[in-house]
Amino acid sequence: TQPTISYQCIYVTVFEQEHFQGKCLEFTSECCNIHNCGLDNIRSIRVESGAWVGFEHHDFQGQQFVLERGEYPNWEAYSGSLSYHNERFMSLRPIYCASHHSSRMMIFEGENFTGRSTELCDDYPSLRAMGWFTPEVGSMHVQCGAFVCYEYPGYRGQQYIMECQRHSGDYQHWRNWGSHCQTPKIQSIRRIRH
Amino acid sequence: TQPTISYQCIYVTVFEQEHFQGKCLEFTSECCNIHNCGLDNIRSIRVESGAWVGFEHHDFQGQQFVLERGEYPNWEAYSGSLSYHNERFMSLRPIYCASHHSSRMMIFEGENFTGRSTELCDDYPSLRAMGWFTPEVGSMHVQCGAFVCYEYPGYRGQQYIMECQRHSGDYQHWRNWGSHCQTPKIQSIRRIRH
């Protein structure tokens, strides 16, 4: 069971059409199915405060899109470079962040926290450049804050949001990283800030 | 006139086919036209050391792709989310970087270094979150090192590589950011490291 999220002063405005057109709604907390709010789809987004994650499907399933303050006029703007193109955005929720400098996680070579490991507490556009020896990660444990992990270097490809306050911060296997995850490939990781 | 680039121990391996297949070549310095090296196109890349920038067209023209250490098995892996899809990669060169902590640049509201300004010396997934008041930047001056600027928050969209050691670090107008640039939209910026 997930704790109820209730932040003061965080909100996001979503639009049914691209370029901030059409029916729009404001959210200050999670929405598990935008159809229930009378929207057909989300095609543009203005994040006014907080950090959010959008999902391809309802109930927080499918591809994940980290959303920080700013404007996303269309699907390309928030999706990143993805292995499959499906312009759907059906649910969203705030991300539990920590203060920037206290964010901390461990990555492990093998699943279930086995094999070689290293601690991360910064942003890493290339795990390889900071000494990680393979383009894959076997398992992860988030000790504090929230991170976004990416398939490719330079914060590209599929995104996986990892939070200390969900699953006790434990991500034992790539099957736990998200319902859209199909490989253990992770080549860049960064902290998420409000 | 540009200084000759000559680093020790930096190299990149490029492949004519996806997934590191087909004809391959190693580069340790810039290549202004891969046709001259006997390659038809570049479809996958392994960056072994250094930071590089790839270009859509020969002579360092067109869309820019920042390439840090790691593996890029296909076009999606290095392109980012782009406003136009054109699977061409025709030239590449190393990026002049500074030590991570000395990288520094100024951004300005207006072109030609006018209007409100702020100094950047960190990574900023959302310029808005750090206090910048608009989704646009009018002009930029890189004082030290190299940065990559992105159209959208979270390091997404078109990429523009800005270097202290090119154009004296001066980027007066969005038309100087690259031949592919069509708007002053910049919503995230980060340092480039070796």
Image: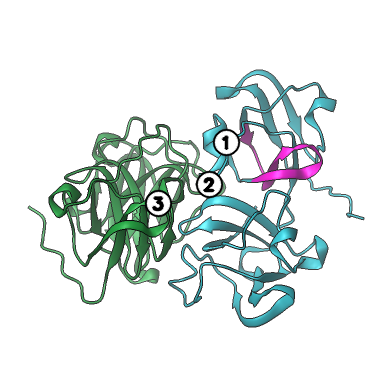
Chain colours: A green, B cyan
Residue B187 coordinates in the image, percent (x, y): 52, 63
Instruction: Evaluate whether label 2 is on the same chain as label 1.
Output: no
Q: Is residue A15 left or right of residue B28?
A: left
Above or below A92: residue B35: above
Disc 2: CA contacts within 10 A as few (<14), some (14-19) or many (>=20): few
User: Pointer 2 and pointer 1: residues touching (CB < 8 Å)?
Assistant: no
Residue at 54% from the left image edge and 29% from the top image edge: B73
Disc 3: CA contacts within 10 A as few (<14), some (14-19) or many (>=20): some
Measured Cα–Cα span from mark 3 to mark 1: 19 Å
Measured Cα–Cα span from mark 3 to mark 2: 41 Å
Residue at 84% from the left image edge and 49% from the top image edge: B5
Query: Given the image, on which type of amino acid does mark 1 rest?
Result: His
Residue at 11% from the left image edge and 55% from the top image edge: A2
Q: What is the chain letter for disc 2?
A: A
Disc 2 secondary structure class: loop
Disc 3 secondary structure class: helix
Q: Which mark is residue B85?
A: 1
* Nearer mark to the viewer, of 3 and 1: 3
Instruction: Evaluate whether label 3 is on the same chain as label 2.
Output: yes
Magenta stretch, residue numbers: B45-64
Q: Which residue is mark 2?
A: A131
Above or below B129: residue A132: above
